[in-house]
Amino acid sequence: MFTIHPGAKGLCFALVLPLGSPEASDPVVAHRAWPAPRLAGPAPATGLINGPADFAANPANHNLPFMIPHNVGKILVVRLSARGDVAFASPLAGALRRRFPRAHIAWVAEDAAADVIRHNPHLDEVIVLERAAWRRMLRGWRWGSLAGAVTGFFGALRERRFDVAIDAQGLLRSGLVTYLSGAPVKIGLGSREGSGRLMTAVVERGGDRRAISSEYRYLAGVLGLGTDPFPMEIPRSRTEVDAVERVIEEVGLAEGFVVACPFTTRFYKHWLEERWSSLVRAIPERTGLGVVLLGGPADRAAADRILGGAARPGSDPEAPHGASRFSGPEATTAPLVDLVGRTTLGEASAVVSRCRALVGVDTGLSHMAHAYGRPAVLIFGSNTPYLDSPGPSAMILHSGRACSPCRGKLTCEGRIDCMTDISVEQALAAVVSCLEDGGAPGAAEPVRAATARRDTGGGPETAAAGAHGMATAR
């Protein structure tokens, strides 16, 4: 039987629970590989590496072999979470496919983020690590079940016999997945928390921090992959697209709508709820377009507070199911549709693909607008995943405070001043501007259904096209 690690409980904790932080010292890893060489030199002046020439031009890399052989048979990409980061990393799939058209390319993602990459046409399979189920086993002290699930997952992963595994996350848990894949070549991106000891080579993080997906573009260049183009690709299944089309027709949004994404797991990335209430009320009054509120089940209470603040006396009792209508001197027939916690991630992203514009904070759904070419207004403060606009129809609102980005190390006694600096009027003006520049009626089209992939059978879950029907909105 395949032994996954000396000390199974330690492995289970490492995979299931978040460990360490970017600033924490590297913990000791019980089972080491040989020390990994690190590609540490500075990036080119452009902030981008564009293949072997730039790789060789860096003196720090001269003693390192070019890492992926031209005749590679099987490649594994490990980017487990989070949703936005998986979206940022998604161009790696296309870059690998264009460079190695005959290779079998797989991706490991956690269950909470797998829908982002599930239908990518460049992948032969998506392998889902059921972290939520493993955590339930851990919290319930079901050690036998957990050990069986973990051992079975990695045993099946090793049976695939990958030639190269790329840890595009660089944490201990992603490094363990990469190491336990059994691939002889294991490449880490900016490996920390001790995971560098599990790699055969580590690529230091590089690129232009102001640009979207720059660290993954940098990695692609070091690996000899093409980086122009380097687009995010998040296609949806026909089932998801059809479900969204039905809801759009049902609630009266066929003429267009604006998506609002107020929710994220980190409190310091939130904009004020009362401002969201004002904004979702003002958008229909100013533009005549409906608003769709998106989020997950954990955002339900916050969504109710935002919607309660946006409501006005005398709302239309005959509004379509799942929609509210405004009334008063500035009345509009445009609905406010609440889909928070009522869609799968795939369905929510299909809603984004159909919007006229999106406004949101630093959260996965907001970033997906760029993959679909939809106009977007991003409200950034203590965290700034990028500051250069990804396209002509995207606008980033940022206070420009010297303390931003602090990445959660608040110096404002929890006030989050960088977010309170941004007013409703500024956000509304940005939405209107994006609509005028890039949100013409009919511009949004359903993305193509994912192409079929061959079934590898057995082992860890292999994603198939399709999704559950969209949950009924209230």
Image: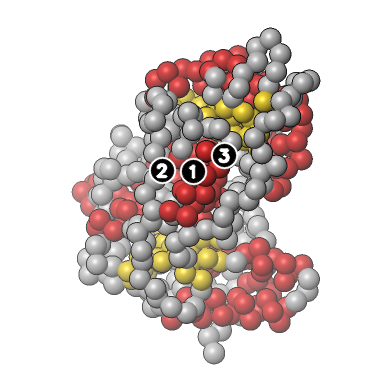
Q: Which residue has dot 2 on it?
A: 446
Relative to 367, is 95 on the left or the right?
Answer: left
Residue at 67%, 76% (x, y): give it.
Answer: 146
Q: Position of residue 150 (x, y in %)?
A: 60, 76
User: Mark 3 or mark 1: which comes first in sequence?
Assistant: 1
Relative to 379, is 442 on the left or the right?
Answer: left
Residue at 43%, 37% (x, y): give it.
Answer: 370
Residue at 69%, 48% (x, y): give it.
Answer: 297
Number of other residues with Cα within 10 Å of mark 1, as a class: few under 14, some 14 to 19, many 20 or more: some
Q: Amino acid at mark 1?
A: Glu
Q: Amino acid at mark 2?
A: Pro
3D distance between C-alphas at marks 3 and 1: 9 Å
Q: Residue 123's image quarter? A: bottom left
Give the label, 3 or 1, closer to the camera. Answer: 3
3D distance between C-alphas at marks 1 and 2: 8 Å
Can you say which quadrant of the picture contains the N terminus? bottom right
361 w.r.t. 131: above or below: above
Q: Amino acid at mark 3?
A: Glu
Q: Which residue has dot 1 on it?
A: 245
